[in-house]
Image (cartoon, grey):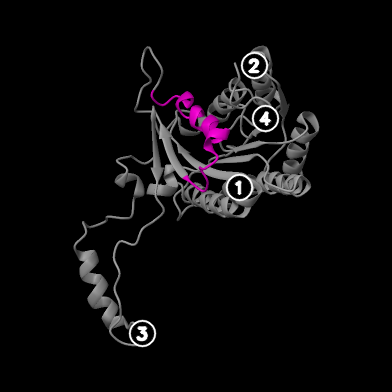
């Protein structure tokens, strides 16, 4: 029986544990050859010694199930390291077809206490890491398209978060990085569409090393699949990586526990026009102050609430 990703090759970053591991296994199950990338540091804040162990273990698991996989242990936030990752997939499998960006770290702190290093490190791994791999994968697809004289096959799946949608008081660095990833995704989707490449982003909710404290009050069930298991997220990644998703491009999807929600782009809630050449302070006060006075005190924009979701 033909598999939807048979003959395709993929990279999954941060694939040694949690969501990335589940996604790598799913892509392999659907027939893709996979480069499993993970820097292998044990701390969710990116601390500790780098190790090949997590990536090697997942690659071995895929091979043990009859799939094709190899490990890459470089840092995707390092520009040359990201190049080597893409080059490895091309050298080993002849081409790259799918890029799943998942690698990330946490350095949680309130904005008034956050250090420059805590800000920079999270932006570096999440946002710059997504850009780095995307940059080299995009160049590969553009060159292939030029050589072929038409579109080629390319899929990018990026990892955002509900922290971007609804805010996260103790994660200004993480929320900003995840919002930046959405902007990177939509820009990439527009730039690469003519080459046959799609780019989409997901906001997953899953119980992993990164979210162990967030979901600490929600105990896993004694039997059956945990509603917060990463395995609920992986099928959507497999779908977005497949030929079936050819018309899905520049989209943001929330996924968890057997549910997927498509997030609309922001819409104008209200509009106020000046009755003169330009708005003045007094006119803005007369227009906007009553508008916001009608809203509950402390209410802020929260797209996730519109979706009936809670913040990750």
Tag 1 or tag 2, which sits nearer the N-term? 2
In the displayed structure, would residue 53 be above or below residue 241? above
Q: Quadrant of residue 148?
A: top right
Where does the magenta region start and end?
Answer: 227-251
Is the N terminus in the top left, top right, bottom left or bottom right quadrant?
top right
Q: Which residue is mark 2?
A: 61
Q: Residues within 10 Å of mark 2 (few under 14, many from 20)?
A: some
Give the x, y percent position of residue 190.
57, 54
Q: How much space separates mark 2 and mark 1, taking CA atoms?
A: 31 Å
Q: Which residue is mark 3?
A: 278
Give the x, y percent position of residue 239.
52, 31
In the displayed structure, would residue 263 be above or below residue 30? below
Viewer-nearest residue: 251 or 7: 7
Q: How much space separates mark 1 and mark 3, taking CA atoms?
A: 42 Å
Q: Which residue is mark 1?
A: 121
Q: Is residue 182 visible?
A: yes
Query: Residue placed at 59% from the left, 20% from the top?
Result: 29
Judged left or right of residue 285, residue 212 is right
Query: Helix or strand or loop: what does disc 3 sit on?
Result: loop
Tag 3 or tag 2, which sits nearer the N-term? 2
Q: Which residue is mark 4?
A: 8
Is the C terminus in the top left, top right, bottom left or bottom right quadrant?
top left
- The reply to whether the magenta stretch includes residue 269 is no
């Amino acid at each position: 029986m033909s598999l939807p990703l048979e003959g395709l090759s993929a990279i999954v970053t941060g694939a040694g544990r949690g969501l990335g591991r589940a996604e790598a296994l799913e892509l392999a199950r659907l027939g893709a050859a996979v480069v499993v990338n993970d820097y292998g540091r044990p701390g969710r804040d990116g601390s500790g010694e780098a190790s090949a162990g997590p990536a090697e273990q997942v690659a071995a698991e895929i091979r043990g199930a009859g799939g094709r996989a190899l490990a890459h242990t470089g840092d995707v936030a390092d520009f040359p390291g990201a190049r080597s990752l893409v080059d490895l997939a091309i050298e080993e499998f002849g081409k790259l077809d799918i890029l799943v960006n998942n690698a990330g770290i946490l350095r949680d702190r309130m904005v008034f206490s956050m250090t420059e290093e805590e800000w920079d490190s999270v932006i570096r791994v999440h946002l710059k890491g997504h850009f780095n791999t995307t940059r080299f994968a995009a160049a590969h697809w553009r060159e292939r398209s030029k050589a072929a004289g038409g579109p080629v096959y390319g899929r990018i799946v990026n990892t955002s978060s509900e922290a971007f949608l609804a805010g996260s008081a103790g994660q200004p660095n993480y929320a900003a990085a995840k919002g930046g990833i959405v902007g990177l995704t939509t820009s990439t989707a527009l730039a690469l569409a003519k080459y046959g490449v799609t780019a989409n982003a997901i906001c997953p909710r899953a119980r992993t090393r990164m979210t162990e404290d967030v979901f600490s009050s929600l105990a896993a069930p004694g039997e059956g699949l945990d509603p917060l298991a990463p395995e609920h997220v992986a099928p959507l990644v497999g779908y977005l990586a497949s030929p079936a998703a050819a018309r899905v491009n520049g989209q943001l999807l929330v996924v968890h526990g057997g549910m997927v929600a498509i997030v609309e782009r922001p819409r104008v809630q209200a509009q106020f026009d000046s009755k003169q050449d330009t708005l003045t302070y007094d006119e803005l006060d007369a227009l906007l102050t009553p508008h916001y006075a009608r809203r509950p005190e402390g209410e802020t924009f929260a797209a996730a609430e519109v979706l009936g979701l809670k913040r990750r």
